[in-house]
Image (cartoon, rainbow, N blue to C red):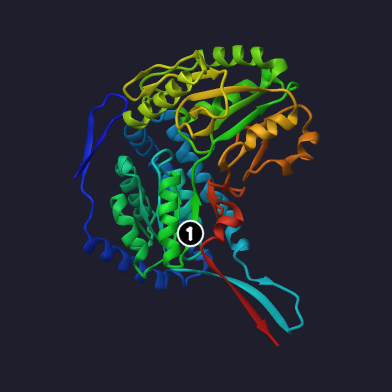
Amino acid sequence: MFSIINPYNQSFLSEHQYIKSFQIKTKLDLSNASFASWSTISVEKRLNFIKNLAFALTKNQHLLADRCTLEMGKPIKQSIAEVDKCKLLCEYYLQNAEKFLENKKIATNGSESFVTYEPLGVILSVMPWNFPYWQVFRFAIPAIIAGNTVVVKHASNVAGCAQLLEDLFTDAGFPEGIYQNLLIAGKQVKGVIDDPVIKGVSLTGSEKAGTEVAAAAAAQVKKAVLELGGSNALIVCNDADLDTAMPEIINARMQNAGQSCIAAKRYIVHKAIFEDFNNRLIKGLAALRSGDPMHEDTDIGPLARTDLAEEVEKQVNDSVAMGARILTGGKRNEAFYEPTVLVDVTPDMPVFKEEVFGPAVPVVAFDTFEEAVALSNMTNFGLGVSIFTKDVESIKSRIHLFTEGAVFINAMVKSDPALPFGGVKRSGFGRELAENGLKEFVNVKTVYIK
């Protein structure tokens, strides 16, 4: 048994029990049996269920948002926006999936050659708590449209959200076994991966969890997609329009209390505007409203658990002990951690070299753009980078210098249904969203006729 505690006021929300091995097997067998029929129907018919799902999202928006906010502390307006984004994802694939999955004709010396895209089978996904609906949708919707069935092991502290997700698919009329919630502990995941029914696995989560899942999948020669951590740099050039850019720059770090893999976690600012930038940043953070995440005017809620806030506190304090200086913030109250800005930061400090999963940001000065690139790349992660400048053409010619999965110019790094999402280095491999994500869990089958 395990309990879920509201991170805002530490009140008890619910109690749950992980399912046993025989129950897991029953669910996997059901998914496998459902795959036999689901994989044979047309993409058009599968999309009819996606239409129903989009309607179910609208109908249950506030139920879903409330549960998300209660379980992991996200401000309610951000929870509502997350549900809306899931609907946008459905609409994107409703418009594009049939075209993406059409046979691709290829000219060869044969009389006919083409490629087909066929589903693999039952796909396991291991999902995190920070975006409990969006993370699942961006995996599950493409996989299901492609003809797979899915089982989802969600994070335990959002078990209520996880059950609501399965209820959504039931409400939308999906056949039994197409989408199933798998309420299991982390130590049970390897056994699921080892089961012959599972044909692939997708994980969004920590680097540690990713390496364990990748190793288990590789041992069984099964396809894996990993979306892991990030330590994105946000570079502010001396010609950046700070009057326009500051709200986006602040949101890039403080959205969801900084609990996002693609959040800007290291600000790299030209020395000519360093002081002005910090003054604007501190003023902007002071205007953010912190408090009860169920209130619509709250901008910053608690972190998802007290131990997560304690980890951010430790990373900041350890960096201060090494010489960093706090300009604002730096205090914790249970699961709340104040928006925090640090300067005099060096690359060997935890707030620079580690992923900080909370509302604390180091600000580092640079002189030349080459120095900014070097600082940006000085990380084991490679998820994304933002650059703010008026000289867009110059940056476009230097995109290749960044070892990242994404480069955003004059915008925060974000996921978009129409754009491939994923990283390099220790941020993982594979892609979600767009056409790339739709084809991650398919058999790309070559057909040659002479």
Residue visible at 62% across and 48% down? 419
Q: Is residue 416 left or right of residue 213?
A: right
Vertical side of 447 occupied by 290: above or below = above
Residue visible at 43% across and 58% down? 215
Image quarter (top left, top right, bottom left or bottom right) of the N terminus: top left
User: Disc 1 marks which amino acid?
Assistant: Ala
Name the residue nearer the viewer: 189 or 165. Answer: 189
Residue 287 appears in the rendering: no
Percent position of residue 291, x then y:
38, 19
Image quarter (top left, top right, bottom left or bottom right) of the C terminus: bottom right
Vertical side of 316 occupied by 226: above or below = below
Residue visible at 76% across and 39% down? 398
Residue visible at 58% across and 16% down? 281
Q: Is residue 149 left or right of residue 277?
A: left
Neighbour tally class for label 1: few under 14, some 14-19, many 20 plus, Cα within 10 Å: many
Percent position of residue 49, x then y:
45, 58
Name the residue nearer the viewer: 89 or 279. Answer: 279
Write down the residue under mark 1.
Answer: 224
Vertical side of 40 occupied by 135: above or below = above
Percent position of residue 336, x then y:
37, 22
Percent position of residue 114, x then y:
66, 75
Q: Is residue 285 left or right of residue 450?
A: left
Name the residue nearer the viewer: 215 or 12. Answer: 215
Residue 236: image quadrant is top right
Q: Secondary structure at mark 1?
A: strand
How many labels sit on residues? 1
